[in-house]
């Protein structure tokens, strides 16, 4: 009875995660380029294994093997190889659905040399997601080694491709993942739906390994503001009919509100599902507290260190071990405990309630039902959980030309500007190119070099613009040096254009030729003048004992010039001397007159002066 009840509870978890959810099949485009009868763009479903080329494309030719058409056996057994010959196109293997796991088909195709595998559906239905098998039902040693992309195509398309191949037609296909993920702006938002459980077999092991490997890149992207990362955890609720059962009590917290399957699928040993829920909650709370302190990237350190220091196998999957890790990272344990709250209380937990609500799909993103799941720009990532593959997918989420430098490393993408500058404009002399490498491919865009902006179409022409343009490769203008003289067709106070300097003629860009002023009789035109052409100019002279006057373009006698010059100088000196003496005399005269008038005015106040009349004396008569 106990086993049946346990199965019922587990079945409820599965039904809740699938029947009530809205699972979205992630797709990419498949373009048939030949033959003409199939030429069109089709949809195909991205497999949840291998390495889809997010942000890129892949061109190949389709082969449908005459034997082992379901690809359930090694192609070596039927002596078939899909390895590309020199000069040949990559091979896309077309295999029929059925008889074995999708992953095994891809593994066999990869080992035979195929670049990708297309699985044709065997029934008329909407496209589905090809997923990895349950580990207990399959030998999963090869799952993490599948590196080729895979796609499920409709039965109708598969039948049409087979038909054309049977006629001897070559079917060429372009698999395109450039629009598989949205790329609206310069920041990528992504979620990682994970689990603290480390006893679920190869899937859990690969998940822990991914976190360890991806931690460095994730923290760089987060610290520099390129991404916004949020971890999430899936939980289920226990149906009311089973809340009081031992199974629900061992797998749930908060009275059946938040549950997780038993780690070992054995209720009688090891850790219980509720232990997983509590540790998931602790990780979610750690992120919440770290994010509030402005350091959300510490989550990667905590999850990595917890997996190493507190594994289930060593019986260290406990609060004490988790608290030690939290303390070592400098985060307040009390704040974490407060966030976790009372797991035995018959109330909602705000953090886990928000997680359950986030699990429901919104917009283009469906419900999250697979663990682990990566959601990038609100679209679920499909493919191998591998550092390189995931980083490539995240990089495809940036708006073109805004991706960080980590996305342009050789490990992530091929530099398309390396060969022939991507077909863009290139100035070999200055080693300047208009080719700009981006994650999605190259763009031809005139560059900005040392503050100087180049303008043009980027393909055939780019020209330096601005007042500093002559500092960069002379503004793209002609420049020449000869006989110790340097001339340039770049004009500093002009923002664009080239003009040959005086004394030269030409287009100013490729060449400027010296003008022979003497031959063209543009200078030294007097009868006694002699003209000598120089690079960029000319020199004029005179025959005999004559001196050339440049201002008047004439020749005069050196002797006459000397006499005339000497007399003229003495006349100037004499004139200046006379002017000086006369000026001094006038100055002295005016000063003297001024002083005399002042003295006379003062003395007039005390005594009669010579020029004043006699003043008569009046004697009073009373004194006679």
Image: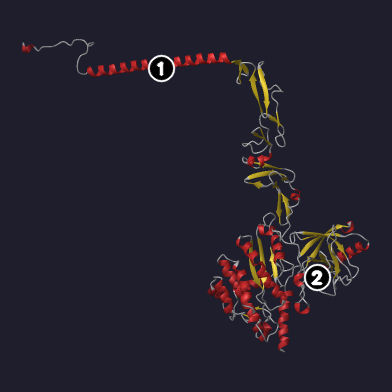
- The relative height of residue 312 versus residue 542 in the rendered view (above or below) is below
| Disc assigned to residue 580 | 1
Quadrant for the C terminus in the image: top left
Q: Residue at x 71, y 64 (%)?
A: 388
Give the number of callouts: 2
Crowding at mark 2 (Cα within 10 Å: few <14, some 14-19, many 20+): many
Q: Residue at x 60, y 62 (%)?
A: 223
Query: First in sequence: mark 1 or mark 2?
Result: 2
The local secondary structure at tag 1 comes to helix
Closer to us: 12 or 119? 119
Closer to us: 16 or 408? 408
For label 2, the residue is: 107
- The relative height of residue 462 versus residue 78 in the rendered view (above or below) is above
The image shows residue 335 at horizontal and vertical percentages of 54, 73
**Going by the image, does 451 lie left or right of 9?**
left
The image shows residue 537 at horizontal and vertical percentages of 66, 27
- The relative height of residue 400 versus residue 311 in the rendered view (above or below) is above
Residue at the far front: name it.
544
The local secondary structure at tag 2 comes to helix
Residue at the far bottom: name it.
1
């Amino acid at each position: 009875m106990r086993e049946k009840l346990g199965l019922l509870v587990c079945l409820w978890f599965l039904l809740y995660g699938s029947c009530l959810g809205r699972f979205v099949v992630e797709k990419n485009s498949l373009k048939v380029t030949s033959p003409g009868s199939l030429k069109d763009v089709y949809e195909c479903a991205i497999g949840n294994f291998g390495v889809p080329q997010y942000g890129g494309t892949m061109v190949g030719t389709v082969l449908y093997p005459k034997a082992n058409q379901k690809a359930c056996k090694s192609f070596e057994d039927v002596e078939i190889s899909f390895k590309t010959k020199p000069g040949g196109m990559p091979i896309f293997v077309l295999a029929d659905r059925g008889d074995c796991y999708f992953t095994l088909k891809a593994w066999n195709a990869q080992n035979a040399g195929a670049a990708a595998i297309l699985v044709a559906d065997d029934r008329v239905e909407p496209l589905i997601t090809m997923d990895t098998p349950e580990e207990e039902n399959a030998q999963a040693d090869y799952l993490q080694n599948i590196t080729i992309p895979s796609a499920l195509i409709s039965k109708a398309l598969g039948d049409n491709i087979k038909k054309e191949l049977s006629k001897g037609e070559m079917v060429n296909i372009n698999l395109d993942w450039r629009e598989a993920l949205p790329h609206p702006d310069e920041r990528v938002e992504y979620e990682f739906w994970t689990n603290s459980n480390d006893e679920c077999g190869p899937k859990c092991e690969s998940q822990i390994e991914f976190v360890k490997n991806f931690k460095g890149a994730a923290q760089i992207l987060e610290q520099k503001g390129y991404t916004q990362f949020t971890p999430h955890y899936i939980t289920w609720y226990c149906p009311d009919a089973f809340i009081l059962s031992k199974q629900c009590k061992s797998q749930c917290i908060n009275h059946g509100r938040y549950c997780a399957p038993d780690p070992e699928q054995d209720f009688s040993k090891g850790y219980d599902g509720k232990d997983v829920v509590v540790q998931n909650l602790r990780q979610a709370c750690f992120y919440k507290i770290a994010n509030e302190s402005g350091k959300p990237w510490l989550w990667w350190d905590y999850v990595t260190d917890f997996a190493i220091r507190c594994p289930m196998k060593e019986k260290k999957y406990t609060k004490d071990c988790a608290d030690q890790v939290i303390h070592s990272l400098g985060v307040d344990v009390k704040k974490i405990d407060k966030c976790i709250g009372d797991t035995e209380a018959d109330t909602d937990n705000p953090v886990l309630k928000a997680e359950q609500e986030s699990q429901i799909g919104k917009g283009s993103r469906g419900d999250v039902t697979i663990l682990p799941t990566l959601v990038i720009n609100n679209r679920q990532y499909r493919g191998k959980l591998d550092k390189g593959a995931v980083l490539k997918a995240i990089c495809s989420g940036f708006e073109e030309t805004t991706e960080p430098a980590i996305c342009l490393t050789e490990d992530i993408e091929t530099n398309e500007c390396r060969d022939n500058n991507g077909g863009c404009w290139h100035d070999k002399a200055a080693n300047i190119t208009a080719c700009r490498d981006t994650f999605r491919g190259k763009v031809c865009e005139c560059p900005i070099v040392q503050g100087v902006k180049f303008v043009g179409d980027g393909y055939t022409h780019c020209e330096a613009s601005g007042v500093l343009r002559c500092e960069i490769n002379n503004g793209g203008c002609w420049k020449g040096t000869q006989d110790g003289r340097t001339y340039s067709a770049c004009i500093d106070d002009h923002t664009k254009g080239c003009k040959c300097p005086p004394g030269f003629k030409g287009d100013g860009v490729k060449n400027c030729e010296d003008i022979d002023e003497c031959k063209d009789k543009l200078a030294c035109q007097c009868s006694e003048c002699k003209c000598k052409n120089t690079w960029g100019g000319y020199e004029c002279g005179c025959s005999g004992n004559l001196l050339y006057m440049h201002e008047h373009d004439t020749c005069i006698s050196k002797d006459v010039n000397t006499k005339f010059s000497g007399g003229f100088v003495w006349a100037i000196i004499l004139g200046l001397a006379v002017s000086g003496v006369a000026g001094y005399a006038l100055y002295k005269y005016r000063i003297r007159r001024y002083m005399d008038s002042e003295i006379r005015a003062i003395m007039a106040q005390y005594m009669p002066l010579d020029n004043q009349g006699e003043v008569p004396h009046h004697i009073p008569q009373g004194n006679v």
